[in-house]
Image (cartoon, rainbow, N blue to C red):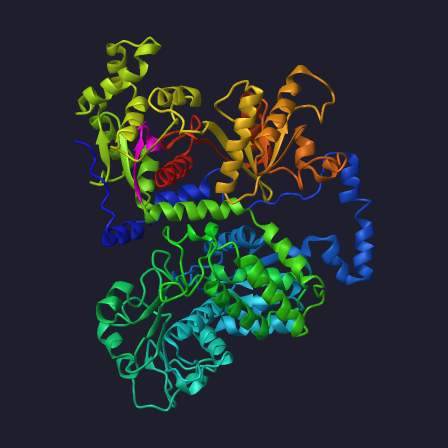
Amino acid sequence: MPPAKIDKRSDNMASLRRAAQVTAQEALAFHAGGKPGKLEITPTKPLATQRDLSLAYSPGVAIPVLAIAENPRDAYAYTSKGNFVAVVSNGTAILGLGNLGALAAKPVMEGKAALFKRFADLDSIDLLIDTADPEAFINSVRYLGPSFGGINLEDIKSPDCFVIEEKLKELLDIPVFHDDQHGTAIVVAAGILNGLRVVEKDIGDVKLVCAGAGAAALACLNLLVMIGLKREHITVCDIEGVVYEGRKELMDIYKAPFAQKTNARVLSEVIEGADIFLGLSAAGVLSQEMVATMGPKPIIFAMANPDPEITPEEVKAVRSDAIMATGRSDYPNQVNNVLCFPFIFRGALDVHATTINDAMKIAAAEAIAALARAEVPDKVAAAFLGERPTFGPGYIIPAPFDPRLLPHVSAAVAKAAMDSGVARNPIVDMEGYVARLRGRLDPVASWLQSTFDAVRSDPKRVVFAEGEDHAVIRAANTFLQQGFGQPILIGSKKVVTERFRELGIPLRKEFALIDTTASPFLEEFSDFLYSRLQRRGYLKRDCERLVTNERNVFGALMVAHGHADAMVSGVTRNWTSVYSDVHRVMDPKPGRHVIGVSLVLSRGRAVLVADTSIHDLPTAEELANIAVEAARTARAFGIEPRVALLAYSNFGQPKSERQEKVRQAVRILDERLVDFEYDGDMAADVALNRSLMDHYPFCRLSDTANVLVMPAFHAASISTKMMKELGGATLIGPIVVGLSHPVQICTFGSTDADIVNMAALAAYGAGRN
């Protein structure tokens, strides 16, 4: 039987999105694969020759040493200090797991360092302090200041975190920021400011009830007081109940300022009539009965993880007028610290700030809030379940992958640092600074994330043609768990079932298993294929044999006939063989040209390389077509294309018959009046190096190329694979574009993670056919 079409009703959609959980096997494999962990150190200067070593170390290094000794501020000019953050923890409060020790905290701290790089292009390293003694911790960190531009404290239990942060801020002349406190507080403040705007309430008038009195909760309350919430309108509840004047149990100097004069002792007694509920406690703390007693248009921030104090569904059942926010990505209005900490450090380090003060925190909160109220551009809209979000109850907080966060928030923080007098390196040209911030991040990473979010919002039926392969089965399982859609595995049902058993993966009912030898589509598919191939020398029995025995042909036929939405293959066979099978079934889209595009990500640069798979020795006309398709693909990735048509020559020298094809392709593009930058012939180093390109002032490209059109696909394939293996570049693709139906082909021997990415890209294409 054919697989049933996925039900896209909202309740099933929500279920699919919440199914996007990470298994223990996946998490461990991710951290262990390749080089263990998530970080490595890469030199920023060449170290190939003796002269390089003489400049980098002795004797050349003595010159900046003397300069810094004379003027310590020169450390920002001659070392990595100004772009370097230490992520420091003792593991006494790891995520929601408790005190598991410094070593157990290392995966989290490495992850935090990776997020600094991903979101703000800040280099970072984890430092684990193996002591639970606050004084010993302080003494370990206080002497590390010269190495770093800032210190991010993480996963330290309360109230030790307060003591540690306060003392280190006194001792060090660089920013010290406990993200568990202030990162959460900044994002919460942004959301509440916007929530109050939506419900048209004034912050000075509202009543807030907080469940939880740990570091994050108290930091939220303190920041909200700074922006106008009245302390006497705040009631705090902790594990002992209401924090009231005179209470002795579990009280400290940080909690005491919020003690109220009241006879109430439990949450249900203080929630009635409240305008805001702020939850940083535990699942199930807030009941539907309590929500029903809150004031009109209540704002509910339920941020316990992984399960909130109350779910949006539970709130909706009793209140249609409530605004909800949680800490989870599968609900609107996610309170996520990544909205804040990379950007506040970016702004602070760029002005060489001595601290991160209250003015900078407020500026960050207001900037985040303002971004949610701004019009959402096309490249951001895809991250919001396929719909363009508009400011309102379901969108009071920006998405974590909104690429506007870096320039918007960091610039606001930098300005606040300058205005409050803690900036040692004030920015003169703020517009230029914002432009540089926009250029720091790779737009493709945001595009990929928004692509995957769009797939989750509209999951598809994807054929995994090599359904008996172990890596493919693992990938199909992850595809399902991530909420991308329904995997359709082609293979012997007996073999596939045994593979699932061997891998320890439950064969859930959502998996569709297709055995080509017993399919009800054999006659329909054979007739269709014979009608396409009969004048290419194929007999009817040849087509019947292809449909029965060639899984790539069968999978492509399923997609072509609407029994599936997309297909992925290529793990067990070479790329060209798979494409040949698919091409028997499918043609290019009308007016399009099928090409393979590889995306190369290296050291903060994203470059598209074409054609990496289809045209062996393209003609001049085909090179022009490849350039047009590659430019179209670049724009889909959020990149404004600057296309270089490559050769080993530069604008005619040295002369050769082969480079003449490239020059002719440029003339064809001239005649077509295309709407993107292009030029050629040029060598790869000229195309990618600004200083070399400057030797050719007539070059039409306004900057280095981000799309490379290769003169032959063997050159493209060789160069991209060399970059991956020798240069450490991340390589995605070849991605097939221009085909009538969405099919993606992995490279031979791809990992399960690679297969999932290609399957998701195929599913994304299915939503846009």
Q: In the rendering, at what x and y percent does residue 606 appear? A: 56, 40
Task: Please state, as top left, top right, bottom left or bottom right, where the C terminus lies in the image.
Answer: top left
Q: In the rendering, at what x and y percent does residue 64 appear? A: 80, 52
Left or right placement of residue 622 versus residue 31 in this view: right
To which quarter of the image does residue 396 belong? bottom left
Closer-to-camera residue (428/38): 428
Can residue 471 be found in the magenta stretch? Answer: yes
User: What span is colored magenta in the figure?
Assistant: 459-472
Residue 128 seen from this side: no
Left or right placement of residue 571 versus residue 115 in this view: left
Q: Residue at x 30, y 53 (%)?
A: 18
Can residue 307 be found in the magenta stretch? Answer: no
Q: In the rendering, at what x and y percent does residue 276 appear? A: 36, 76
Q: Residue at x 23, y 18 (%)?
A: 527
Closer-to-camera residue (732/281): 732
Residue 55 seen from this side: yes
Q: In the rendering, at what x and y percent does residue 312 appear? A: 29, 64
Task: Please state, as top left, top right, bottom left or bottom right, where the N terminus lies in the image.
Answer: top left
Closer-to-camera residue (710/574): 710
Please give the count of numbered marks on the rendered protein: 0
Left or right placement of residue 418 versus residue 108 in this view: right
Closer-to-camera residue (36/296): 296
On screen, residue 342 above or below 457? below
On screen, residue 171 above or below 487? below
To which quarter of the image does residue 265 belong? bottom left
